Image (cartoon, rainbow, N blue to C red):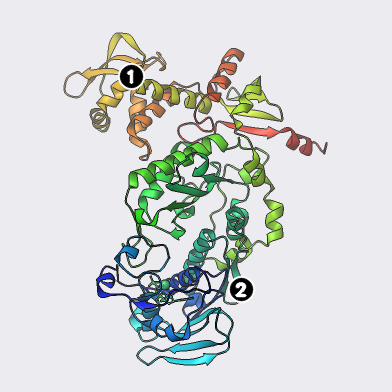
Amino acid sequence: MDKNNINPILLLPEEVSSKIAAGEVIERPSSIVKELLENSIDASSTSISLEIIAGGITSIYINDNGNGIPKDQISLAFQRFATSKVRNLNDLNSITTLGFRGEALPSIAAIANISMSSQTQNEDFGHQIISIPMEPLQITPYGTSPGTSIKVSQIFENFPARKKFLRSPRSEAAKIHSICTQYAIAFPNIRLKLIADNKTILSTSGSGNLLETMYEVYGKELQGKTISINSGSIYSNEEIKIEGILGLPPLHKGSSKLIQTFVNNRSVENRMLTYAIRETYTDFLPHKRFPVAIINISISPDQVDVNVHPTKSIVKFLDEGKIFSTIQKTIRTTLTEQMPIPDLSGKSLSINSPKQQNLSDISQIDNQNTLPLQNIAQNSQLTIDFQDKKPQKEIFDFLHPIGQIKKTYIIAEGPDAMYIIDQHAAHERILFEDILNKINQTNISKQPLIEPLIVSPSSTYIDIIEKNMETIQKIGFEISHFGSSSYLLQAIPSTMSKHNPKSGFLKIIESIEKSRENSPITNQFASSLACHSAIKAGDKIEMTQITKLIHDLSVCNNFHSCPHGRPTIFQLTTLQLEKEFARR
Ligand SMILES: Nc1ncnc2c1ncn2[C@@H]1O[C@H](COP(=O)(O)OP(=O)(O)OP(=O)(O)O)[C@@H](O)[C@H]1O
Ligand SMILES: [Mg+2]
C-alpha cells in the first residue's frame, strides 16, 4: 500500500461483520503481540521494534514506521468491526492483508490499558489516544514521527480469573519469541527487533534475503544445513508458487517445531501441509524424526479461506489435492536433484541432530539466535557452496571403486573426494526402487519353491497377512490358506534369498508390524523385502559386484538414502584430507 494513500477505517456493514469468524481473539500476551505485529505489517512498515516486560504480562510496547492512522479515524480504530482492510463480501473472499476483521484493537482495549500515538506521512503532528477499559477514550495532540507506537499494560487486570491462568513470564516470552520468529521469516524485508526485559532476543536486518534472515533468526543451528526451494524452477505455471528453505536430510529434529508453513506470508497451521512435507521426507530421514522446512505458498487469495477461525492462523484451500502434490513434487525434486553428498568433514553436516534448542530458555536464545551480520556472512560459506553446486549424480560417472572395508563399506575415489558407501543401505535403495518399478509394471519375478512350505504365524501376524494379502502377492509371494491358521507358501520373490524362505517371509511380516505409518503400504512391503534381500554388513563382495552396485545406485531416483532414511553415501574431500595432514 502507498504510504501516502491510506484506505480510511470504516465500520463494516452488518452483512459482512456477521460473516466474520469472531470469537476469543486475545487469550494471552502473545495474542496481543501477534495482532499488533500484524497491524504494523499491514501498515507497510519496514521497521518494527517490540519490547516486552515479564513475557508481556507487565507490558508490551511496539513501534513501527508504517502508514500511521489519521487523527479523524484514530478513535474508530477502537470500535468493533471498524477496519481499513476489507469493505464488502467480495473482499472477504479474497483477503490480501493479515488483518480483516476490525476486532483486534477493540479486543485488546477490552482487557488492558492502551496508549497509542500515531502520525501519518502527510501530517506534521501526531495524536495520542489513551484507552482504559470502561472509560471514554482521550485523544490529545502529540509530537511524534510518522508511524505508530502502542503501549499495552495492565493486561487482564480486571479479569483476575484470566490472569491466573497465564503461564510464567518465561513461557509467555518464549511464545512471543516464536511468533516474532515466524513473522521475521515471512517478511525478510522488514527489520524486526524483539527486546525482552531489556535484552535483544531477536533482530533481523530487513535485507529481504530469506536465507540471511533465517541465519539471523536461528543462528548456527541451521547454518550450512539447508538448500533453497523454489517451485518456479520445476513448474512453469505460476498458479501455486512454493519458496523457502529445506533442511538437508542429515539434519533432523525430534519435533515438528521447524516445519513452518506460510500461505501468502501468513503463518498458518494446516495438518495437510505438515503431512505433505513429512511424507515427502519419509525415505530421506530416520524413522520418527522430523525435517526442517520453512515454506511459503503463494496462491491467489480467492483460492484460500483465512476467515475460518478467530486466530486467523487456520486456512482452508479450495483445491487441497493440488497444493499437496505441488509441495511434494517440489520438495522431492529439489532434494533429489540438488542435495549434495554429505561431507564427513563438515561438522555442520553431522548425522547426529544438534541439541534441541529450548525456546523457553531466553538467555540461550540471546546467545544463539542473534548472531551479528558479520558472523553470519563468515559462517555461511558452506551453504553458499551448496547453492552453487551442480546436481551430484554426475559424480558417479567419475567414481573409481577401490574396494571394501570391514566387509561393510565400499570405498571409491572421485575427482575431489573419497566416497564411502554403506553396502547394505545402498543395495536396499537399489532393490527398493527396482521392486516398486516392477510392481508398477506388474512384472515382479517369482521363484517357485520345489516343495511348498507350511507357515503357521502368530495371530498378530495372521491379521497383517489377511489385511495385506493383495500386496503380499504383488511383491512376489504366492501363498494360500492352509487350514484355519496356516498358509501354504508356494513361491517367493526372486530377489529374496532361497536359504530360508519361511523365516524370510515372517521377517517381512514382522517388520510391517513395526513399520512407520507414514508411507503407503506397498512401499512398506517393498522396503521390507529390499531390506531382507539386500547384501548385509559383513558380506564379502567382489570387485565386479562393487562396480555394479555403484552404477545401480547412480541411476536411483534418490541415491542419498535407503528406504528407511539412513544415508547411503558420504564423502571425505581431498581438501579436508590435506587440511588434516597439514598440507594446507
Ligand atoms: N500500526 C498501525 N498502523 C496503521 N494503522 C493501524 C495500525 N494498527 C491498527 N491500524 C488501523 O486500525 C484498524 C483497526 O485495527 P484492528 O487490528 O482492530 O483491525 P484489523 O487489523 O482491520 O482486523 P483484525 O481484527 O483482523 O486485526 C486497522 O484496520 C488499521 O486501519
Ligand atoms: Mg489487526
Residue 494 or residue 61, whichever sits in front: 61
In terms of depth relative to the viewer, which is nearer, 220 or 26? Answer: 26
For residue 442, the mark is 1
Disc 1 crowd rating (10 Å Cα; few below 14, some 14-19, many 20+) is few
Residue 479, image x, y percentages: 26, 18
Q: Is mark 1 within 8 Å of ligand 1?
A: no
Question: Mark 2 sits on what residue?
Answer: 199
Quadrant hosting ligand 2 = bottom left
Q: Position of residue 362 (x, y in %)?
A: 56, 67
- Reply above or below: 359 against 151: above
Q: Which mark is residue 226?
A: none
Q: Give left or right: position of 224 versus 2.
A: right
Residue projecting furthest to the right:
583
Residue type pointed to by label 1 = Thr
- Residue at image point 63% right, 27% down: 395
The residue positioned 35% from the left and 82% from the top of the image is 79
Badge 2 crowding class, 10 Å Cα cut-off, few under 14, some 14 to 19, many 20 or more, is: few
The amino acid type, in three-letter code, at marker 2 is Lys
